[in-house]
Image (cartoon, rainbow, N blue to C red):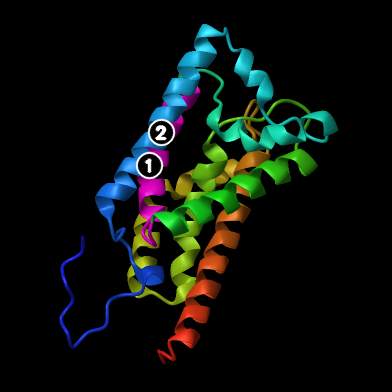
Amino acid sequence: MDPAAPSSRAPRPLSHRVIPPKPLLSAVVVLLFTGALYVIEGIDTVLLGALDANGVRPRVWSEWDNLLWAPVLHAGWDHLIANSLPLLVLAFLASSGGVRQFFQVTAVIWLASGLGVWVFGSVGVHLGASGLIFGYLTFLLVRGVFVRSAWQIVVAIAVFAVYGAVLWGVLPGQPGISWEGHLFGAVGGVLAAWGVAQDAKAERKRANVVT
């Protein structure tokens, strides 16, 4: 729980925070989700990779619903391990608006990535949490601009310095890499940041706060 703010200062709006209001809860949520990915990959290993067939298959009408669970499937342990650290870091930072907002942001990225791949993706099976990672990355990069938060822009610069190079993954050219999933996940992150900013504006109007 955050320490009480001085009476002369208003508490920082959730949309402007850089650290989750309940960091322990956010950490537990992110760890549980990442841990679930390992459990699923363990089950997939026992089933000799049978779950991997449930990734997104572009424009296959009978399997459109695969976009709902493709992000929790991975093409082997190396794939999952490579995604784990950036997922943990970026998801935790993306929960700075609280767990409820984090779930909303995740849903937008999840659906944008899956739908984008299903409509525009190349033939094959697309799976993995990298679409979420790219979405959280772009969400963190642009939300500070949308909500006009200097501290969030500072965080965005730091995040870009560490993970900015991975943005090349939205471009085609790497065999076996779902660049479409990365691209539309990134688009989902921008949409989620815009949505958070719109909610913040509406909240300020309701509270008659002038900034």
Q: Position of residue 92 (x, y in %)?
A: 36, 49
Q: Position of residue 70 (x, y in %)?
A: 62, 32
Contact, mark 2 vs mark 1 (Cβ under 8 Å): yes
Element class at badge 2: helix
Q: Position of residue 34 (x, y in %)?
A: 41, 33
Disc number placed over residue 34 in the picture, else none:
2
- Residue at 16 percent across and 72 percent down: it is 4
Which amino acid type corresponds to the residue marked 2 in the rendered image? Thr
Relative vertical location of residue 175 with respect to residue 92 in this rendering, above or below: above
**Where, by quadrant of the figure, is residue 22 drawn?**
bottom left
Looking at the image, residue 134 sits to the left or right of residue 58; the answer is: left
Residue in the foreground of this view, choosing between 15 and 185: 15
- Residue at 64 percent across and 37 percent down: it is 68
- Residue at 30 percent across and 45 percent down: it is 27
Label 1: few (<14), some (14–19) or many (≥20) C-alpha neighbours in 10 Å: many
The residue that disc 1 covers is 30
- The answer to whether residue 171 is visible is no
Label 2: few (<14), some (14–19) or many (≥20) C-alpha neighbours in 10 Å: many
Residue in the foreground of this view, choosing between 76 and 70: 70
Q: Quadrant of the C terminus?
A: bottom left
- The answer to whether residue 3 is visible is yes
Relative vertical location of residue 114 with respect to residue 192 in this rendering, above or below: above
Element class at badge 1: helix
- Residue at 61 percent across and 33 percent down: it is 69
Magenta residue check for 55: no
